[in-house]
Protein backbone atom coordinates (compact mmCIF):
# COMPACT_ATOMS: atom_id res chain seq x y z
CA UNK A 1 0.00 0.00 0.00
CA UNK A 2 1.46 3.35 -1.02
CA UNK A 3 0.96 6.11 1.49
CA UNK A 4 -0.65 9.35 0.36
CA UNK A 5 2.42 11.29 1.46
CA UNK A 6 5.24 8.81 0.78
CA UNK A 7 7.70 9.50 -2.00
CA UNK A 8 8.68 5.85 -2.31
CA UNK A 9 6.92 2.55 -1.80
CA UNK A 10 7.74 0.90 1.52
CA UNK A 11 7.56 -2.85 2.03
CA UNK A 12 6.58 -4.01 5.50
CA UNK A 13 7.21 -7.62 6.48
CA UNK A 14 5.34 -9.00 9.47
CA UNK A 15 6.78 -12.25 10.77
CA UNK A 16 4.46 -14.15 13.08
CA UNK A 17 3.38 -17.63 14.03
CA UNK A 18 -0.01 -19.07 13.12
CA UNK A 19 -1.15 -18.53 16.71
CA UNK A 20 -0.65 -14.76 16.22
CA UNK A 21 -3.09 -14.55 13.32
CA UNK A 22 -5.42 -12.25 15.24
CA UNK A 23 -2.55 -9.78 15.77
CA UNK A 24 -1.81 -9.77 12.03
CA UNK A 25 -5.48 -9.19 11.18
CA UNK A 26 -5.66 -6.37 13.73
CA UNK A 27 -2.58 -4.65 12.24
CA UNK A 28 -3.99 -5.00 8.73
CA UNK A 29 -7.33 -3.54 9.86
CA UNK A 30 -5.62 -0.60 11.53
CA UNK A 31 -3.46 0.04 8.46
CA UNK A 32 -6.53 0.04 6.22
CA UNK A 33 -8.37 2.40 8.59
CA UNK A 34 -5.38 4.77 8.75
CA UNK A 35 -5.14 4.80 4.95
CA UNK A 36 -8.87 5.51 4.62
CA UNK A 37 -8.74 8.23 7.28
CA UNK A 38 -5.79 9.96 5.62
CA UNK A 39 -7.68 9.99 2.33
CA UNK A 40 -10.72 11.50 4.04
CA UNK A 41 -8.52 14.12 5.72
CA UNK A 42 -7.04 15.13 2.38
CA UNK A 43 -10.53 15.46 0.87
CA UNK A 44 -11.73 17.44 3.89
CA UNK A 45 -8.78 19.83 3.72
CA UNK A 46 -9.28 20.21 -0.04
CA UNK A 47 -12.84 21.43 0.64
CA UNK A 48 -11.57 23.91 3.25
CA UNK A 49 -8.92 25.19 0.85
CA UNK A 50 -11.51 25.65 -1.90
CA UNK A 51 -13.78 27.50 0.54
CA UNK A 52 -10.92 29.76 1.61
CA UNK A 53 -9.99 30.55 -1.99
CA UNK A 54 -13.62 31.40 -2.76
CA UNK A 55 -13.86 33.58 0.36
CA UNK A 56 -16.35 31.37 2.17
CA UNK A 57 -16.17 31.57 5.97
CA UNK A 58 -14.71 28.56 7.71
CA UNK A 59 -16.18 27.60 11.06
CA UNK A 60 -13.72 27.93 13.92
CA UNK A 61 -14.01 26.67 17.46
CA UNK A 62 -12.78 28.49 20.54
CA UNK A 63 -9.63 27.16 22.15
CA UNK A 64 -9.80 26.62 25.88
CA UNK A 65 -7.50 25.25 28.54
CA UNK A 66 -8.32 23.66 31.86
CA UNK A 67 -6.51 21.82 34.65
CA UNK A 68 -7.82 19.43 37.27
CA UNK A 69 -5.69 18.28 40.17
CA UNK A 70 -5.99 15.43 42.60
CA UNK A 71 -3.84 13.33 44.89
CA UNK A 72 -0.60 12.82 42.93
CA UNK A 73 -1.83 14.08 39.56
CA UNK A 74 -2.50 17.13 37.41
CA UNK A 75 -4.79 16.66 34.41
CA UNK A 76 -4.34 19.25 31.65
CA UNK A 77 -6.74 20.04 28.83
CA UNK A 78 -5.27 22.00 25.94
CA UNK A 79 -2.68 22.11 23.21
CA UNK A 80 0.08 19.67 24.18
CA UNK A 81 2.77 21.79 22.51
CA UNK A 82 1.81 24.86 24.52
CA UNK A 83 1.32 23.02 27.81
CA UNK A 84 4.48 20.90 27.71
CA UNK A 85 6.62 23.98 27.06
CA UNK A 86 5.41 25.29 30.43
CA UNK A 87 6.16 22.05 32.31
CA UNK A 88 9.36 20.88 33.98
CA UNK A 89 11.50 18.40 32.05
CA UNK A 90 10.78 14.74 32.84
CA UNK A 91 7.58 15.61 34.69
CA UNK A 92 5.15 13.64 32.49
CA UNK A 93 4.46 10.06 33.53
CA UNK A 94 1.45 9.26 31.34
CA UNK A 95 -0.23 10.99 28.41
CA UNK A 96 -3.52 10.50 26.60
CA UNK A 97 -3.59 11.89 23.08
CA UNK A 98 -6.87 12.58 21.36
CA UNK A 99 -6.39 14.08 17.91
CA UNK A 100 -9.08 16.56 16.87
CA UNK A 101 -10.97 14.21 14.55
CA UNK A 102 -14.20 16.21 14.71
CA UNK A 103 -12.62 19.13 12.89
CA UNK A 104 -9.63 17.09 11.66
CA UNK A 105 -7.07 19.85 12.00
CA UNK A 106 -7.32 22.20 14.97
CA UNK A 107 -4.10 23.84 15.98
CA UNK A 108 -3.43 26.69 18.34
CA UNK A 109 -1.33 29.66 17.22
CA UNK A 110 1.38 28.68 19.72
Image (spheres, rainbow, N blue to C red):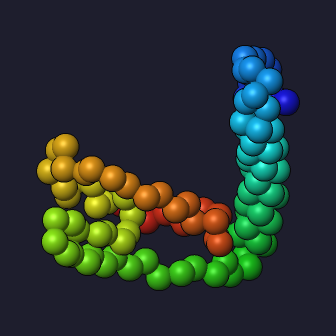
Q: Nearer the viewer, residue 8 or 47?
A: 8
Query: How many numbered marks, from 0 up?
Result: 0
Reply above or below: 17 against 98: above
Q: Nearer the viewer, residue 107 or 29?
A: 29
Residue drawn at point x = 77 percent, y = 63 percent: 44
Residue drawn at point x = 64 percent, y = 81 percent: 59
Looking at the rendering, which quadrant does residue 61 occupy?
bottom right
**Residue 19 seen in the figure:** yes
The location of residue 40, given as percent across then percent down, is: 80, 57
Q: Residue furthest front?
A: 19
Q: Residue furthest right?
A: 1
- Asked if residue 69 lies left or right of residue 28, the reply is left
The location of residue 38, given as percent across then percent down, is: 75, 49
- Asked if residue 53 lies left or right of residue 81, the reply is right
The location of residue 66, given as percent across then percent down, is: 31, 78
Residue drawn at point x = 27 percent, y = 50 percent: 93
**Residue 31 seen in the figure:** no
Task: Please state, as top left, top right, bottom left or bottom right, where the C terminus lies in the image.
Answer: bottom left
- Asked if residue 67 lies left or right of residue 7, the reply is left
Task: Please state, as top left, top right, bottom left or bottom right, where the N terminus lies in the image.
Answer: top right
- Asked if residue 12 lies left or right of residue 60, the reply is right
Q: Nearer the viewer, residue 49 or 38?
A: 38
Reply above or below: 7 against 103: above
Reply above or below: 72 against 93: below
Residue drawn at point x = 19 percent, y = 75 percent: 70
The location of residue 20, given as percent across then percent down, is: 73, 30
Looking at the rendering, which quadrant does residue 8 occupy?
top right
Amino acid sequence: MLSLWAKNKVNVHLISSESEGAIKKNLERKAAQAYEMSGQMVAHMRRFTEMEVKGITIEKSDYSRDIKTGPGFDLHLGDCVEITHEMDDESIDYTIFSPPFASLYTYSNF
